[in-house]
Amino acid sequence: MTEQQAMITGMNRTWLAQSWSRIEYPLYLVRRNPITLFGFVVVLMLVILALAAPLIATRDPIAVSPIDSLEAPSSRFLLGTDQYGRDIFSRIVYATRTDLFIALTSVGLAFTVGTVLGALSGYFTGVVDILLMRLVDVVMAFPPFILAMGTAAALGAGTANIIYVVALIQTPIYVRLARAEILSAKERPYAEAAHMTGNSDLQVIFGHLLPNCVPPLLVQVAVNLSWAILNAAGLSFIGLGVRPPEPEWGSMINEGMAFMLSGHWWLFTFPGLAIVVTILAFNLLADGLRDVFDPRLRW
Amino acid sequence: MRFLLYVVRRLLLVIPTLLGVSIVCFSLVRVLPGNPAYFIVGPYATQEEIAQVITQLGLDRPLYDQYLIYIGNVLRGDLGYAWHTSQPVLSDLAQRFPLSIELSTIGLAITLVVAIPLGVISAVHRGSWIDNIARVVAVTGVSMPMFFSGLMLIYFFFFRFGWAPAPMGVLDMLMDPPPRVTGMILLDSLIAGNLTTFRSAASHLVLPAITLALPMIGSITRMTRSSMAEVLHSDYVRTAIAFGLPRRTVIYRDALQNALLPVVTMIGVLYGFALGGTVLVEMIFGLTGMGSYSYGSIMNMDYAGVQGTVLLVAVIFVVINLAIDVLYALIDPRISYG
Amino acid sequence: MTCLLEVRDLTTHFFLRRGVVRAVDSVSFTVAENEMVGLVGESGSGKSVTALSILRLIQPPGRIVSGEVHFQGRDLLQLPETEMNRSVRGQAISMVFQNPRSCLNPVLNVGTQISRVYRAHRRASSADAHLRALEYLKLVQIPDPDRVMKRYPHQLSGGMCQRVMIAMALICEPVLLIADEPTTGLDVTVQGQILKLMRDLREQTQAAQLLITHDLGVVAETCDRVVVMYCGRVMEVGPVQDVFARPAHAYTAALLHSVPDVRKDFRTRTIPGSVPDPRDPPPGCRFHPRCDGCTDICRVEEPPLVEIHPGRQVACHRRVQSRY
């Protein structure tokens, strides 16, 4: 890289990129908005829970024990047992792994593919851009859950398939967002400057333009993390998701549903609360991020 | 004149979209490993029936021909045969889709009636107790999965308090449905002048509609609130106040009218969300609409049913979005008189 | 000429998280009947905030902290909000803003918007209001007013939008028209048209005008008196001819000096330094860090606005006369 290119790259680094090097910035974020801190802490705890599942869960999540079936929450079984005598607490802890994994991978996949496609499409325009936009229109012509349901039914149940399906329904959002951002960014003078100092097109897109479009993309990622869990749990609920006996919050609720009206409320309530807490945490985090990048919209 | 041009352009755009939708639905069944014929006729079919389906759908022909046959069938109203109900898919759907539309519409109506005033008041009275309550309601609504909130509602309002009817069907047992005019039970009851069935249907539809509405209330409240807050700080609102226009006029005519424009576009998206949600809600509340039909098809591995439902729902969604876009063009002069 | 508007020690601050922005600090001036007064200053001098404060259009986090605005025998800052809306805003005092297109409601047509203002202050049927709106569109020299009545703001040019706003401002026959940078953002030729329109209107309506601008040329051409502001305070007041020919304040002198002169060498002579942070203005005279005639007292004590001749006031310890 010539000195000129380096200088322009340096100038193009966003305030965000410059700030991360300071320790004050995250603390400042947290101080401004305690609710976001709460969300962030909860997400962190969930990640720890997921990683340390074998250490925290008290029993084997898939071990059946017919004698203990349908026990109410007690000191022996923190959150009770299900119809097969499996410890619900341990199942929820292990399900954290499953659901977080699905959320993170599907969002990661959608984000990567969507952003790259959208950025390329927005930068180069032309026939490919038009075709891609029509394709996005087609995918978005389906109500998201219906498309997820249909595709999952076609592909079959299983964790990998759920990840692909949930990624599929999110990808158009990233494509459109990245494309819109790049379309406006490439008109700015710094884009022209980056180009003229010898950067190739790809270098301009991914080294200069895209880093400056990070804020709205980041907010979208946080929002989609909660959305992904909702959809994954929903698909598992109707039997198209994670295969039993692997624990997953949605399928646990489905199993618990049958015993709800006979008074065994703990089967469906606790997994449900787990979902609510997780989604709430991601939503609060997304709100906090939105706050930081566009304080006008602050609640 | 410009408005008509816009409508025509918008209509033309619908065609490639619908084409794409049909291709996707077509491929849904073709993706499965093995011979699609087995999935279409079900596990109880005989060899002859399988052979019949193979020729009928041209499954021994190249993919392109298969697609043409498929499209031809669809346009003639043949969406296949659902072996798990022993009926053509189209008649199953025709019977069931009004209920889902009815449920989605009621859910959407509840949403708008609750969320818009809440969002407006929050924006006008920032920081007040209403604002804080609205924030909590919005965030919890958005964070609760529908299948969970539905079950919770049943647990408390039916099981514990006994206020709601049992989650089985749309009318009380042993009650005769009104003569079918639109297929939507509330409308049909009103048309027939039968208030008992109307009340019964309403009581059965309340909880499912609320379940559908909760997440939508969350997002619409936030959206209205932020849109309204932005508009309240706009130049034209400040100008209106500067000219001494009464506060009430400014809030309703200047602020609200402009703030609600983005909300109108959201209605289309919400309808899609509601239609998707009917799969879960109908299943939980024991209602016989399109949603539970697709669930039943999935459970029974009846792919004709799944394919048909996905196609129909997508087409309805496209039509609704088209209607919303046209409506928006009507109310925003910047579109129609550019 | 009788005094129409008297602003006395007006102070408006903005209470932000990062500090208190002292946008307007103890500003005083008057506007007489049928007089055209120019309120002049750089961006950030507080001139717009002053105008907004007169009509009490300041929204949180801003607040009018103290002061008096005497108008028609009443202190506007003490009036209840409803009374302000009913009898003052749009009625006795009207204001037009810059960026006229964004100041008009995008979803209502021109006719409706103008009529609304009329019907807010007078009992009139919609037909009567419509006629009157048409009349005023003609007054502001809009061609083909019948067609324009049905148009929407986005279909009109900037100049047309400004004329519409002026029509809205005048329709209830105010005695004072405040114009906040009415020509900023418009093409130069359109600027000239709007200014000429405002001069014509002044003759026709006999209303006083308070013109807020950063453009000295505009003030020189159109105004009777000028009020020079800097960093939230009034620096100099006086008849336009007098102030521009013999500026008494170093800042005014520097401003005039910075205008490129075609007859001389057409160089721009900028004032060294930059406008201070309004949260923390310099002690003493706010202009002292940039003033090349700065003395010890200037650094310490804030100069009061004193009258050096009848009708001529200046806030400067040195009261320089014609340095340049």
Image (cartoon, grey):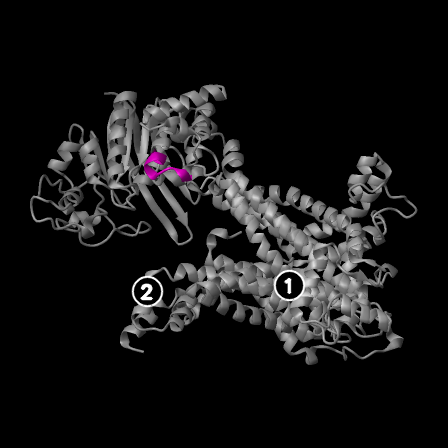
The answer to whether residue B243 is left or right of residue A196 is right
- Residue at point 38% right, 37% down? C156
Q: Quadrant of the N terminus of chain A?
A: bottom left
Which one is in front, A77 or C78? A77
Residue C52 lies, in percent from the top left, at 36, 37
Q: Determine which quarter of the picture holds residue C58.
A: top left
Residue C64 lies, in percent from the top left, at 39, 38
Which one is in front, A30 or B296? B296
At label 2, counting other C-alpha atoms closer than 10 Å, the crowd grade (few under 14, some 14-19, many 20 or more) is: few
- The residue that label 2 is drawn on is A192
The answer to whether residue A267 is left or right of residue B246 is right
- Residue at point 81% right, 57% down? B88
Q: Main secondary structure of the magenta part?
A: helix
Q: Height in image: C277 above or below C100?
A: below
The answer to whether residue B280 is left or right of residue A85 is left
Q: Amino acid at mark 2?
A: Glu
Label 1: chain letter: B
* Magenta stretch, residue numbers: C154-162
Residue B27 lies, in percent from the top left, at 67, 67
Q: Amino acid at mark 1?
A: Ile
Q: Determine which quarter of the picture holds residue B71.
A: bottom right
Q: Height in image: B228 above or below C274?
A: above
At label 1, counting other C-alpha atoms closer than 10 Å, the crowd grade (few under 14, some 14-19, many 20 or more) is: some
- Residue at point 59% right, 57% down? B17
In magenta segment, residue C219: no
- The residue that label 1 is drawn on is B23
* Marks 1 and 2 on same chain: no
Q: Height in image: C176 above or below A252?
A: above
